[in-house]
Image (cartoon, rainbow, N blue to C red):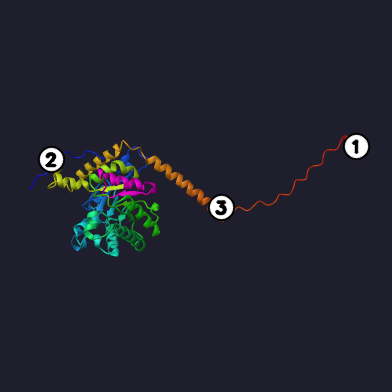
């Protein structure tokens, strides 16, 4: 067995999680970045937001239906900020019929409800059972992009209508920029106003590789005029360097993959093997991501203020339109006619006043 490679230091400090501030001086604190996690207890242990797939939750189910999702009372020190992923790509790529993504909609919702019950905290959002559109998955499943787009929207609508208490995430699926625009139009046809959602998933951007980074950037910039609160599923560091100003949130489990492939192990770690499930390594990777976001793309001007200005203009337009509608519904009555003013008689000369007396 290959021994893990040493030489990487544990992070002494990291960028703390203090919520999101669109006006923060630090670009890395203008979006929510979730650490992808394989271990459900990280929900309460990690000091930063966690992105939890349902597959390891099911694997962690213990005897007597006990789920060790949380640390013992008082042991956890995390902010309990998390989101739930359906693991759609893994479910279809692995062909595992027992993956929770393959559950019926109602059973899937019940599983999510159970996680929320045990954590006692509502996640920021829960991914619906969207249909990824990577070419290798389409070839493996015999599907096409159009079918996957419609089924993605229909699944979200079913879960939202029949299980409205969970914060379901609408996800845009596709492969080309036009595909994603079509998906947004399909949501509109089904009566879903994506602009009202705190997060809108951007799917099929995770597995594209370095050579596809430009395509991911093109997709994000194409959707930018819609002013949606996009969540970048598994977005790479190179893509985040450019796309972060357009996103509300993002996630990645690349830190774990890197540890497995390169047999990385931080100095001072006491766990067995490499750092594929090491929170310290995950936090160190998170700082690498944040450094890239802070560096940004030198060839691209900042867009945060432009987005805010566009949002303000749109808000004013909506308020003006609402005022015009109210004026049409409740017209102001015309004022009552005013009696004409009778002019005062001109003063009489003094001799006329004397004769009158």
Q: Secondary structure at mark 3?
A: helix
In x, y percent, where is residue 39? Answer: 21, 52
- Residue 83 x/y as whole percent: 29, 52
Which of label 3 and label 1 is nearer to you? 3
Task: Please count the marks in the image.
Answer: 3
Q: Residue 14 appears in which quarter of the rendering?
A: top left
Residue 312 quadrant: top left
Name the chief secondary structure element in magenta. helix
Check if mark 3's residue and mark 1's residue have beta carbons within 8 Å.
no
| Res. 154 visible in picture | yes
Residue 322 location in percent, x, y?
A: 51, 51
Mark 2 or 1: the one toward you: 2
Q: For the point 33% across and 61% down, which residue is it?
A: 154
Q: Is residue 219 magenta?
A: yes
- In primary-sequence order, the first of circles 2 and 1 is 2
**Magenta stretch?**
213-237
For residue 78, say whether it is visible.
Answer: no
- Considering only order in the chain, which callout, 3 or 2, is on the residue closer to the N terminus? 2
Pointer 3: what residue? 327
Count neighbours of disc 1 (C-alpha within 10 A) and say few if under 14, some if 14 to 19, many if 20 or more: few
Closer to the N terminus: mark 3 or mark 1? Answer: 3
Whole-angstrom CA distance, mark 2 to mark 3, is 71 Å
Which SS class for mark 1? helix
What is the spatial separation of the Cα atoms under label 3 and label 1, in whole angstroms? 61 Å
Instruction: Tell me the tag on residue 354.
Output: 1
């Amino acid at each position: 067995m290959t021994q893990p490679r040493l030489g990487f230091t544990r992070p002494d400090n990291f960028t703390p999680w203090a919520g999101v501030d669109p006006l923060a001086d630090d670009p890395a604190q203008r979006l929510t970045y979730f650490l992808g996690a394989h271990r459900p207890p990280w929900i309460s242990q990690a000091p930063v937001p966690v992105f939890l797939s349902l597959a390891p939750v099911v694997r962690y189910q213990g005897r007597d239906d006990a789920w060790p999702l949380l640390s013992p009372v008082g042991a956890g020190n995390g902010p309990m900020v998390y989101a739930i992923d359906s693991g759609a790509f893994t479910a279809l790529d692995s062909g595992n019929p027992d993956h929770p993504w393959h559950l019926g909609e109602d059973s899937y919702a019940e599983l999510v409800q159970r996680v929320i019950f045990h954590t006692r905290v509502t996640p920021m959002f829960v991914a619906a059972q969207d249909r990824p559109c990577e070419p290798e998955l389409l070839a493996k499943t015999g599907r096409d992009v159009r079918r996957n787009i419609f089924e993605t929207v229909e699944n979200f609508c079913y879960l939202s209508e029949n299980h409205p208490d969970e914060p379901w995430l609408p996800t845009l699926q596709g492969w080309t920029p036009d595909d994603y625009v079509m998906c947004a139009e399909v949501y509109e046809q089904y009566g879903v106003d994506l602009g009202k959602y705190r997060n809108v998933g951007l799917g099929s951007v995770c597995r594209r590789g370095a050579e596809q980074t430009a395509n991911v950037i093109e997709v994000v910039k194409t959707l930018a005029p819609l002013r949606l609160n996009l969540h970048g599923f598994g977005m790479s560091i190179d893509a985040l360097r450019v796309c972060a100003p357009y996103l509300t949130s993002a996630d990645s489990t690349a830190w774990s993959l890197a540890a497995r492939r390169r047999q990385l192990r931080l100095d001072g770690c006491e766990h067995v093997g490499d750092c594929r499930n090491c929170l310290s390594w995950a936090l160190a990777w998170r700082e690498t991501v944040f450094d890239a976001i802070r560096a940004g793309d030198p060839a691209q001007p900042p867009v945060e203020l432009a987005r805010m200005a566009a949002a303000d203009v749109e808000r004013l337009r909506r308020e003006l339109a609402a005022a015009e509608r109210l004026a049409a519904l409740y017209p102001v009555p015309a004022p009552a006619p005013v009696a004409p003013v009778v002019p005062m008689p001109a003063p009489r000369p003094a001799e006329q006043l004397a004769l009158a007396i």
